[in-house]
Image: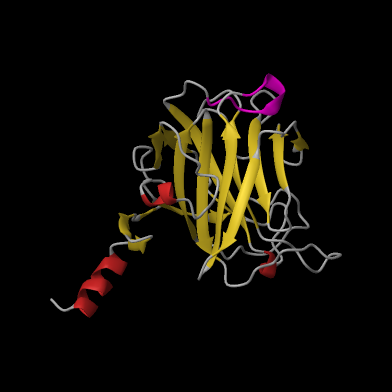
Amino acid sequence: MNTSNLMKQLVVLGVAATAGSLAISATVAPGAPIAQRTIRVLSAASTDAASPEAAVWAKAPATQVALQPAFPGHGSIVGTPVTEKLTAQAVRAGGQLFVKLAWIDRTANTAIKDTTAFADGAALQFPVNGKASTTPFMGDPKSPVNVWQWRADGRTENLVAYGFGTATRAPSEGLKSAAARTDSGWAVVLTRSLKVKPDEGASLLGKSTMPIAFAVWDGANQERDGLKAVTLEWWQLRF
């Protein structure tokens, strides 16, 4: 088999060449069993994974996650998000969780201007109680969710929500982000301590698994608020 044909087969199988290594990552479709909807966390004794270009990401398992249009939380939000999938990786080291997201976005939208320009963004969501029985649609009054949100205008927010339209800022000194443009879009790392105070969101300390959900906004497509591409069901981090 010649090199050209081999590369074509690798693309079909979802094999991506990154940082000099091969990472097999077939896209997992919505509705797949929870065993398939799993992001395996690489545990390292001591490493700094805060940068999207950190060497450790070449070792962390990569999984492609299919995204779907979110349920619009307000009638004024209309449109169809354009991002169809992202690649997720996770590293646990030094008492912190690092989650890297990468996705295709041909234009970098880094500012919000009036009502005509919106910033690119991405977010992670966790149930505060750590249970997959929590609704993934922004939680509810009895079972809130914790959202880590990155925006391309430089803002990173730690939010707690008790249902649609209830997201409020929570203390976020420990939540950090770093982003880089790639040849095809964005690579973003969100970092936070495993252990937090009760008012800071979901604790990840001592967990073997943790439900997680994802969201992406494409500013060039006027995406903001509830107009976004998301996972409509929980995935899980497996530590």
Against 148, residue 193 (above or below) is above
| 229 within the magenta span | no
Residue 13 location (% of width, % of height): 28, 62
Q: Residue furthest left?
A: 1
Given residues 18 and 144, the one toward you in this image is 18
Instruction: Report the magenta residues as a range.
Output: 196-204
* Horizontal side, residue 225 vs residue 41: left or right: right
Q: Residue furthest right?
A: 114
Q: Which residue does the image show at 39% across and 50% down from the upper left?
A: 62
Given residues 223 and 10, the one toward you in this image is 10
Against 123, residue 167 (above or below) is above
State the colouring used for the structure image.
secondary structure
Q: Which residue does the image show at 69% across and 67% down from the upper left?
A: 109
Q: Which residue does the image show at 53% across and 26% down from the upper left?
A: 204
Q: Can residue 9 be seen in the rendering of this structure?
A: yes
Given residues 119 and 175, the one toward you in this image is 175
| 201 within the magenta span | yes
Residue 228, image quadrant? bottom right
Quadrant location, the N terminus? bottom left
Q: Can residue 135 be seen in the rendering of this structure?
A: no
Residue 208 location (% of width, % of height): 41, 25
Counting labels gives 0
